[in-house]
Image (spheres, coloured by chain):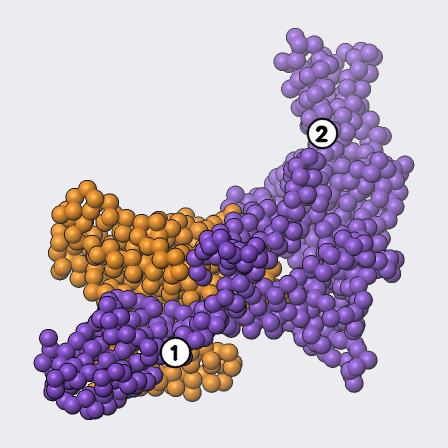
Amino acid sequence: MSEKSNSPRHSLSQRLFLFLGSMDLAITLLLALAVASIIGTVLQQNQPYTDYVIKFGPFWFEVFEAAGLYDVYSALWFLAILCLLVLSTSVCVIRNTPSMLKDMFNLRTQVQEKSLRAMHHSQQWDTENNLKDSVAYVEATLDAQGFRVKQTPKDGGAVLISAMRGGMNRLGYIFTHLAIIIICLGGLLDSNLFLKFAEWQGKISIETRDIPTSEIPNESRLAVGYQAFRGSINIPEGRSAQVAFLAMKDGYLLQELPFRVEVKDFRIEHYATGQPKSFESDLVVYDDDLEKPLEQMIAVNHPLLYKGYAIYQASFSDGGTGLNLEAWPLDKQAGNETVSFDTRVFDSRKMHWGDETVQLEMTAFRPFNINPDPTDDDPERLRNFGPSFGFKIRSNTGEAKEYLNYMLPVPRNGRDFYLSGVRNSPAEEFGYLYLPLDADGELVGFQRFLSTLHDSEKIEQVAQTMMLETLESLDGKRDETLEQSLKQTLNSLVKMFMRGGFVEVSDFIETNIPETEKETLGPAYLSMLREMLARLYFMQASDVPSTEQEADAQLVFLQDAVDAIGSLSRYGSPVYLELTDYDHVEASGLQIARSPGKPIVYLGCALLIVGVFVLFYLPQRRLWIRVNEINGRVNLLLAGMSNRNPREFDQYFEKITQHLKLASGNSSK
Amino acid sequence: MTNNIGILNNEPSRPIEQWLWRGLIFIAAALLIVRYFDVLDSYELSITVFTAACLAFLGQNWPGFRRHIIIVSALSFFAIQLYGDDLGIGKTNFFLSFILASQSAFMWMSALFVMATFAYFSGLLLRSPFTEKVGTVLTWSATTMGVVGLMVRWRESYLISPDVGHIPVSNLYEVFILFAVITALLYLFYERRYQTRSLGGFVLLVISASVAFQLWYTFEKQAHEIQPLVPALQSYWMKIHVPANFVGYGAFAMAAMIGVAYLFKSWRQEINPKGLLATSLPDLSIMDDLMYKAIALGFAFFTVATVLGALWAAEAWGGYWSWDPKETWALIVWLNYAAWLHMRMTKGWNGKPMAWWAIIGLFVTLFAFIGVNMFLSGLHSYGTL
C-alpha cells in the first residue's frame, strides 16, 4: 500500500517486509497470476496421459509434465505465485490496518489554521451571528448531513469543529484485502494439495490399473476423515457403493465413505424436441447413525447434503443393459442360420463363427437416439434412429473394429434400411452399412439372397444356364473349352464380388486383362456379373411380382442388396447383430464431494463484496470549520477533503459552503 | 433544509415524485406477488423483492429511467395481451409481427442503436446539441425496444410450452441483447449525470458492434430460436448471476470506449488544440474520472457475479471452483481490473496509459465473454458459435 523506502538502516527482515508489502510486487503478482491462469484454459487439464502423449509426442509430453502443465493449478510454481500474493496481501493488511482503524475514528482535531487555508477546498467568510450561535448552527447542519462532529477550543477563543462522514470507507480496504487471504486459505483447505503431499512422501500411491474395487491395495485407499475431496462413481440402478474415485494424475485413489449410497432409479426426461430436460436419481443413504435409511431424489442443481458430504447428479451411463441379440450371418463361414443369444453391455464373450473365433465386446446401449441424420444433406434435421447398441469385434491378433447398430429402419429415397456404423479406431468417423429391408420390413429377404450367393451349386447352375444362353445367342455351335472358360469366368466373377465387391472385380479387370481387350471385355464382365446377380436373386425370390410396381420394387431391392453385399468386405464383421429385445439398466454418475473450506470461502466472498462496495461508494469526507472572533467580527474558515470522487466533492463542497453562508447571514470576502 | 445534498445527483430532489415512484413500484411488486404467490418459490420471491428495490432506487432520482420502465411495462403488457395463449398470433397480428414480437422488437432495437450512433457522431462533428439530443432519444428508444423484446421473448418461451419457458438470459444470443441494453442504460445514466452527450457515439459504437454480431448470429446461425434449457441452467441463480455479469461487462465496455475517446482527444490536442475533436469532447479529467467510475462499477458487479457464479457452481457442478475455462477467465478479467484499480487508486496513475489499459481490458473481457465459448471447451459451454 505504501512506497518502498530505501533507507539504508533497514535490516534484512525489514527490507523483506517492505518488499513483500510493496505495491509494485502486488500488481506484478496480480498480473502474473492472470497470465499463468491462461495456460490451464488453453491446454485441457487432467486428461488421460495417453491423450497428451498422442498430442505432443513423447518429448514434449515429458517437458510439459515436468512443468506441471497437465494440472497447472496445483503445480508448485503456480502455488508459489498464489502464496506470494497471499503473503504480499497479508503484509499490506498488517502494515496498514492500524493506521486505517485510527483514521476511521480520528477526527483530526489538531489541524492547524494554516493547513486549513492550504487545502485544495477552502473557503472563508464573515458572519453577523455571534460565535456561539455560529458554532451551534454549523454543528447542527453538519450533523443533519450525517457527519460525526467534534468541537475543540483553540487559542484566542477560536473553536475548531472537525467533522467526518464515511469513515467506514477504510473498512472497505481491510475487508477486501482480508477477504482475499480468507478465500485463498479456505480454497487451500479444499484443494488436493494434502493428497499430493502425501503422495510425494510416499504414504499413498496412485492406482492406474483397471481392477475391481476389492482388489485396490490399501496404499491407494483413503480412510473416512475430515479432508476435502471431489470424487465420482457410477452406480447402476439397484446397486450401491460406499466409495468414490478421486482422479489423480494418470490414475485414481479410492475414497471410503462413512455411508452407503444406493441408486434405486435413474431417469432422463426429455422435452418435446428431444433435448434432455432433467437427469434425476432416487438415492437411498444407509448409515448406522440414521434411524431409517434416508431417501432423497437428486437432480442437476439439486444435490443431496448429508454429514458435510454433497452428492451431485453428474452424469449417467449404461449400467449393464441386458440385450437379446440375433446374429445374421454375412460371411459364408458363419453358416446360413441366424443364431440368438443373450448378453449384457460391458460383457465380452468368445464367439465361434465357422473356423473363426472372435471376441465380442458389448460397449454401449441407448434406448433411443434423436440425432442429426448423417445421411441427410441438412445436418440440422433430427431423426429418431431407435435404440442403438455398440460393440467391438476383436480378432485373435487383438485388432478391433467398432460397430454401432441402430434398430429403427431409416428411410432413404422411400426405402427402409437398417443402419450399422463401423470404424477402425475411435479417431475415425463411422462409415455406414445400409442393409435393405424386404417387403415385410425384415432382413429375411436380404438374408435369403445372401445365402443364395454363398451357395456354390446355385451359382454353378446359373452360370451354366447363362453360359448356354450366351453362346446360343452367338452362333449356337458348341465348344467345350469356351464353355468351360466362360462358365468359370462367370463363377469367379461372383466369387470375386463376394470377396470384395465391385472394387475387387474392377481390380481384376485392371490387372489381368490385356490392355487391348480392356475396352470391350471390362464392361462386358461387369454386365455379366450384374446379370448373374439378378438371376441368382430372381431364382430365390419367392413371390412373383403381380404388378409393375412390385417388379420395380424388386429391382430396386436387388440393387440395394447388391450395394450392401458389395461393401460387406469393408464392413468386416462375419455377422450382422440385430437387437430383438432389451432390459434397460442405467447407471447414475454421482459426484461426491466434501469441502470443509466452503464456509470459510463464502465468508471471504461476503467480506469481499461488502468491502468492494464500501470502498467505491462510501467516500470518506472530512470537513473542518474554524470559527474565530477577530475584532468583534465572527469569521468562519471552512476546509474539506475526500478520499474518493474528487469531482463530486467539488460540487458537494460548493453546495455546503453556499448552505452554510446563506444561513449564517454572511458578508463573504 | 435537512435534505442530504447530492447523494446520487445534483438535481433538486422532488420528494413527491420520488414517493409516487416508490409507491408505484411497491404496488406493482405487491400485485405480482399476490397474483403469483402459489407458483413463486422463496428464491423467486426474494428476486422479485430485490428487483423491485433496485427499480425503486434507480428511478427515484432518474426521471428517464422511470419513463423507460413505465413504457416497457405498458408495451410488454400490451404484447402479452395480444398474444393470449397462442404463439401463432405473433405472425398474424400487425402490432406483434411488425413491432412487438421479440424478434421484431430486437430488429427495431438494432436499427435504433445504429441510428443513435450516427446521430451522436453527427452531433459531435456538427457541434449540434440538437442532433446529439436526438441521439439520446434514439438510445432510449432502442433500449426500450430491447427490454420489451426480452420481456416478450420471456412470455413467448412459455407459450411454446410451459416447460420450455425461461428468462431470456440463457444463451449467447440472448445475452448479447442484454449486453446492448445494459451498456446503453449505464451510458445514459452517466450521460445525464455528467451532462455530456459527446461520448455517446463512442459508447454506442461498441453497442452497434454487438448488434452487428447479433444480426449475423440471427441470420447466419438461426440463433434466435428459443431453445429449452439444459438441466444445468435450470436454476434461480441464472436470474441473478447473468445480469450481474453483464452490468460488469457493460461497464468495462463503456470504460474502454471512453478510453478511446480519451486517447482521441489527447492526440488531437497535441496536434490541433483548437480543432473540433479537441474542443468538443469533454475535459480529459472528466473522461479520466468517468473511466475510473465505470471500471469501479464494473469491478464491483463483476465481483458479485463471480461470487454468485461460484455459489451456483457449488450446486450444479459439485464445487464452487473447478478451474473451468470460463471461471478461470472470469478470474483473469477480475485480476486485470484489480491491478488497474490498484494502479489508479494507490499509485495514482491516470491519463493515457490507463486509457490504453482500459481498452486492453475490453479485449480480455471480450475473450472471457465470447472467446471462451468459441475456442475453449468446458462446463460453461452454453451457446457456441
Residue B7: x, y in percent? 28, 76
What color is chain A drawn in? Answer: purple
> Which residue: 78% across, 73% down?
A259
Secondary structure under the numbered disc 2 in the rendered image: helix
Secondary structure under the numbered disc 1 in the rendered image: loop
Is there any visible trace of residue B5 in the rendered image?
yes
Residue A316: x, y in percent? 69, 61
- The mark lying in front, picked from 2 and 1, is 1
Is there any visible trace of residue A528 in the rendered image?
no
In this rendering, position of residue A415 left or right of residue B214: right
Q: Type of residue at label 1?
A: Asn
> Which residue: 25% across, 68% down?
A119
Labels 2, 1: one chain: yes
Q: Is A452 situated above or below A106?
A: above
Q: Chain of mark 1?
A: A
The part of the image, by quadrant, that contains residue A84 is bottom right
Q: Nearer the viewer, residue A173 or A38?
A: A173
Q: Which chain wears orange? A: B
Residue A211: x, y in percent? 84, 54
> Which residue: 30% across, 52% down?
B351
**Numbered badge on residue A106:** 1
